[in-house]
Each structure stands twice: as C-alpha cells, then as structure tokens.
Amino acid sequence: MRPAPLFDICALILFALFARAAHPPFTFSGAVDAFWPWAVGALVGWGIVSVVRPKNDYGEGAIVWPCAIGIGMLLWILVNGHLPHYTFLLVASIMSFLLMFGWRVIAMRRNARGARNASSSRNAGSARPTDNPRPTRRPRRQ
C-alpha cells in the first residue's frame, strides 16, 4: 500500500484539529465533525485515482484535493442545512490545499535529494570515466 492516502488523511486530521482550535470549544466530537466530510471526499478522490492512475503525487493531489473540498462541502451543507459563509469555503480550501500538497512537496524534494545523493555516491571516487565496468586491482606490495 502506498503511503499517500494515509498522509492525506493525516493532513485532513490536522485540518480538522486546526479548525476546531480556531473555533472553541475544542471537543473530540467537534474534531470528528470537522474531519469526516472532507475525509469522505478524499476517499472518493482516492477511488478515482485508483482508476485514473496519475503519473505522480501532484497528479493524485490534483484529483483528491478537489474531491475532498467539493464533496466535503456538500456533506457539510447537507448536515448543517445551510450554505456556509464564503470565508469558510476560502479558508477551508486554502488550508486543506497547503496541508495536502505541502507533504507532497516535502516528499518529492526528499526523493529528488535522495536520488541525487545516490547518483553522486555511485560516481564518487572515479577521477576519470572508464569503459571497464569492473574495477582494476592494484598490485600487492611485497
């Protein structure tokens, strides 16, 4: 199993915790209420990702994030019985975007750095290119 869905759910948990911390009182049930609509949307997005199979984490995020926002907002409206203030949609969209794409940026930079380090360590110690794939042995000292 890939870790990306788990990281998205963790990002949405943080999103819900930040939301509840900004709007007291902070309760466990309030955090769950702030989490589940967006999580359902993200899970629908991951269902789409499993069919479409984007090339990278950004492509997956470009599917999962709008599903989390769109479906999450629809579920929020159905549960609460009214449209939220536009600032709610704006803040929810920005915060979830930062959290859901933030971990992707960090992961892709770490992967790129790891790939650079691996390629540089393979080339380390070779002062000149050689056609011989096997290293030559030095003669033993007598």
Image (cartoon, rainbow, N blue to C red):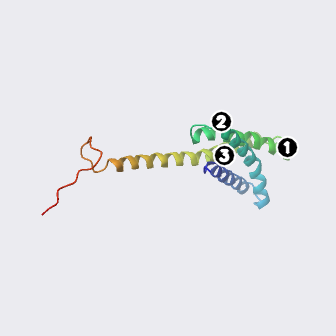
Check disc 3: other Cα within 10 Å, few if <14, some if 14-19, many if 20+.
Answer: many
In the rendered image, residue 81, in percent from the top left (x then y), is placed at 87, 44
In front of the other: label 1 or label 2? 2
Q: CA distance from mark 3 to mark 2?
A: 22 Å
Q: Is residue 71 left or right of residue 109?
A: right
Question: Is residue 72 or residue 45 the one in the foreground?
Answer: 45
Question: Is residue 34 or residue 22 the one in the foreground?
Answer: 34
Q: What type is the residue that disc 2 sits on?
A: Val
Task: Say if mark 3 contacts mark 2, CB within 8 Å.
Answer: no
Residue shown at the point (35%, 50%) measured from the top left = 121
Q: Is residue 86 left or right of residue 121?
A: right
In the rendered image, residue 87, in percent from the top left (x then y), is placed at 73, 42
Q: Earlier in the sequence, mark 1 or mark 2?
A: 2
Q: Earlier in the sequence, mark 1 or mark 3?
A: 1
In this picture, is 26 found above or below 65?
below
Number of numbered callouts drawn: 3
Q: CA distance from mark 1 to mark 3?
A: 20 Å
In the rendered image, residue 113, in percent from the top left (x then y), is placed at 44, 48
Question: Is residue 99 or residue 45 the one in the foreground?
Answer: 45
Q: Is residue 92 left or right of residue 139?
A: right
Disc 3, SS: helix
Residue shown at the point (67%, 37%) measured from the top left = 51
Check disc 2: other Cα within 10 Å, few if <14, some if 14-19, many if 20+.
Answer: few
Q: Which residue is mark 2?
A: 52
Q: Is residue 27 visible?
A: no
Task: Say if mark 1 contacts mark 2, CB within 8 Å.
Answer: no
In the rendered structure, find residue 28 and report the number of the disc placed on it: none
Residue shown at the point (27%, 43%) measured from the top left = 132
Q: Which residue is mark 1?
A: 78
Question: Is residue 92 or residue 24 the one in the foreground?
Answer: 92
Q: CA distance from mark 1 to mark 2?
A: 28 Å
Disc 2, SS: helix
